């Protein structure tokens, strides 16, 4: 059975098409504009432009979608105030705890190692910079569209697990169209990642939980494994850190941990 009441009298297929079109149009247009201004090679200016432009366009498009449907942000799991902070921290902690546990085991077994060739302040500054970029370029815009708008529209027609599955397939299709998932392993990563995010959205009821989860994953992956940042480097010859610590363990455990925390909260409040 569907898990949510119908919000709008607009056709469901038109709503799904509109949300999907917004996602593809925003990322493709920002990518083309950034390439025209900064060139195709990576630069910090290009990255910052893409991050800010993507968030601004998605926020504007999200507002237009809600106006078109005559609905509110809260209808799509976009809550404000303390609820947003709690949700964000729930997703962040849900990912970080199993990730750090797996990382400690992998480093203790000498399956991977890390290098920090910079002063503490420089490391902290660069980490904060990467966090801001991933929040603006990936976490906020992707979660608003896929685990916010599209997830709710699907939940009006499908059961919980079908909603999670279909939104994951739509996320994979988006990744293929915009060029972020151009190989089989990338498509598989998108799918498993979206399944975990979808379940987290289902049990918490807020898109801010998936934003927190998405942000910390992107932060650790881009900062420690990417070649563009030089204050933290993980040497991972067997890909144990990348596959197990960043992927398999937190993707599997974070939703379960979040579910426990959600169930504990009423008793703690009482």
Image: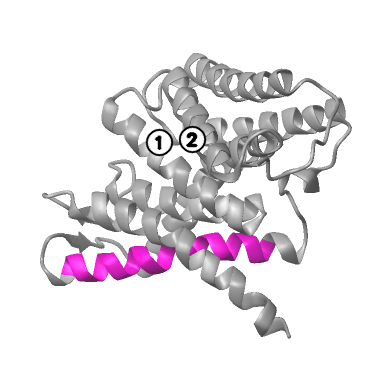
Residue 91 falls inside the magenta stretch: yes
Q: In what element is the residue under mark 2?
A: helix
Of the 4 image quadrants, the one containing the C terminus is: bottom right
Where residue 99 sits in the image (x, y, percent)? 35, 63
Residue depicted at x 61% and y 36%: 52
Task: Say which label, 2 or 1, has the lower sequence index.
Answer: 2
Residue 168: mark in rendering: 2
Residue depicted at x 84% and y 28%: 69
Residue depicted at x 37% and y 69%: 120
Measure the C-alpha gap from mark 2 to mark 1. Answer: 8 Å
Left or right, 165 with reference to 183: right
Left or right, 226 with reference to 172: left
Q: In what element is the residue under mark 1?
A: helix
Q: Which is more toward the observer, 114 or 61?
A: 61
Left or right, 10 with reference to 203: right
**Residue 231 appears in the figure:** no
Q: In the rendered image, which residue does mark 1 sit on? A: 190
- Seen in the picture, residue 7 relative to 237 is either above or below; the reply is above
Residue numbers of the magenta segment: 85-107
Residue 21: mark in rendering: none
Q: Are marks 2 and 1 in contact (CB under 8 Å)?
A: yes
Give the image quarter of residue 58. Answer: top right
**Residue 218 appears in the figure:** yes
Q: Tell which tag, 2 or 1, sits nearer the viewer.
A: 2
Instruction: Please tell me whether the stretch drawn in magenta is mainly helix, strand or loop.
Output: helix
Q: Which is more toward the observer, 131 or 22?
A: 22
How is this picture coloured?
A: one colour
Where residue 118 sits in the image (x, y, percent)? 29, 62
Where residue 112 sits in the image (x, y, percent)? 15, 59
Q: Residues within 10 Å of mark 2 (few under 14, many from 20)?
A: many
């Amino acid at each position: 059975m569907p898990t949510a009441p119908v919000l709008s009298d607009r056709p469901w297929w038109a709503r799904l098409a509109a949300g999907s079109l917004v996602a593809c149009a925003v990322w493709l247009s920002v990518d083309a504009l950034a390439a025209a201004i900064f060139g195709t090679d990576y630069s910090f200016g290009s990255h910052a432009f893409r991050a800010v432009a993507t968030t601004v366009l998605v926020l504007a498009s999200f507002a237009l979608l809600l106006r078109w449907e005559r609905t509110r942000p809260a209808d799509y799991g976009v809550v404000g105030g303390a609820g947003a902070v709690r949700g964000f921290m729930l997703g962040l902690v849900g990912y970080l705890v199993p990730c750090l546990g797996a990382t400690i085991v992998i480093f203790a077994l000498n399956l991977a190692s890390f290098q920090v060739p910079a002063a503490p302040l420089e490391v902290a500054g660069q980490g904060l910079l990467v966090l801001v970029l991933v929040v603006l370029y990936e976490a906020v815009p992707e979660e608003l569209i896929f685990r916010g708008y599209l997830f709710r529209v699907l939940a009006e027609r499908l059961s919980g697990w079908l909603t999670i599955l279909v939104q994951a397939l739509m996320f994979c299709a988006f990744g293929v169209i915009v060029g972020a998932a151009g190989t089989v392993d990338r498509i598989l990563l998108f799918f498993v990642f979206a399944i975990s995010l979808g379940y987290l959205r289902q049990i918490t009821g807020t898109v801010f939980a998936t934003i927190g989860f998405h942000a910390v994953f992107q932060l650790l992956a881009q900062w420690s494994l990417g070649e563009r940042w030089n204050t933290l480097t993980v040497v991972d010859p067997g890909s144990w850190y990348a596959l197990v610590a960043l992927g398999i363990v937190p993707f599997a455990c974070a939703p379960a941990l979040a579910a426990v925390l959600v169930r504990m909260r009423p008793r703690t409040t009482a």
